[in-house]
Amino acid sequence: MIECIVAVGKGGGIETAQGIPWHIPADLKRFKDMTIGHVVIMGRKTFATLNDTPLPRRTNIVVTKSTTEKKHPNVLYMSLEQCKAYINETYTTQRIFVIGGEQLYAALEVFISTIHMTEVFHSEEYSFNTHFFPISSRYHIADVSATNVKDDDISYRFVRIVRA
């Protein structure tokens, strides 16, 4: 089983047409601290939001339909089926994180044993165009940080959700 990291707003929204609508330095630090030295799997669109630049000190896997188009030499490009095979072969020896986006979270949900979620509480109404998959009864909350931690006037909390 693998893990995923996601920040969600109201209704499970994760991104608007303009990108992630909030900036939470503590969330970014948590992401970095958790993923350094491990495997991160992302979709093509998520990789594009990183300016097609791999995250340093991590094994970067980009899931794409066009595995022949290799934009960066330090990235492993895989089809979804190749990615699933990779997970089946390596999840016991490597810590693997799915980092987005919407389609990839949903496609790999059956492999996800732990969800590291940043729950963002916002009063502003965002027009989310991508959402995290609905959390089913297969999962339960393992632990929660203090509610309403504030960072740059944004309230949030960290939630760890595990497969039951």
Image: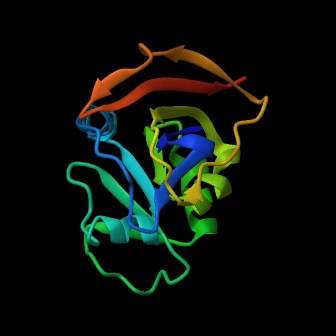
Please state, as top left, top right, bottom left or bottom right, where the C terminus lies in the image.
top right
Q: How is the image coloured?
A: rainbow
Front residue of 65 and 103: 103
Q: Residue at x 58, y 67 (%)?
A: 82
Front residue of 75 and 34: 34
Is residue 75 visible in the rendered image? The answer is yes
Horizontal side of residue 152 vs 38, given as left or right: left
Horizontal and vertical percent position of residue 153: 28, 32
Relative to 143, is 57 above or below? below
* Residue that protrudes farthest toward the left in the picture: 56
Relative to 97, is 69 above or below? below
Q: Residue at x 45, y 68 (%)?
A: 17
Please state, as top left, top right, bottom left or bottom right, where the N terminus lies in the image.
top right
* Residue that protrudes farthest toward the right in the picture: 137
Horizontal and vertical percent position of residue 2: 55, 39
Horizontal and vertical percent position of residue 27: 32, 35
Q: Residue at x 46, y 44 (%)?
A: 97
Is residue 85 visible in the rendered image? The answer is no
Horizontal and vertical percent position of residue 149: 35, 20
Front residue of 30 and 75: 30
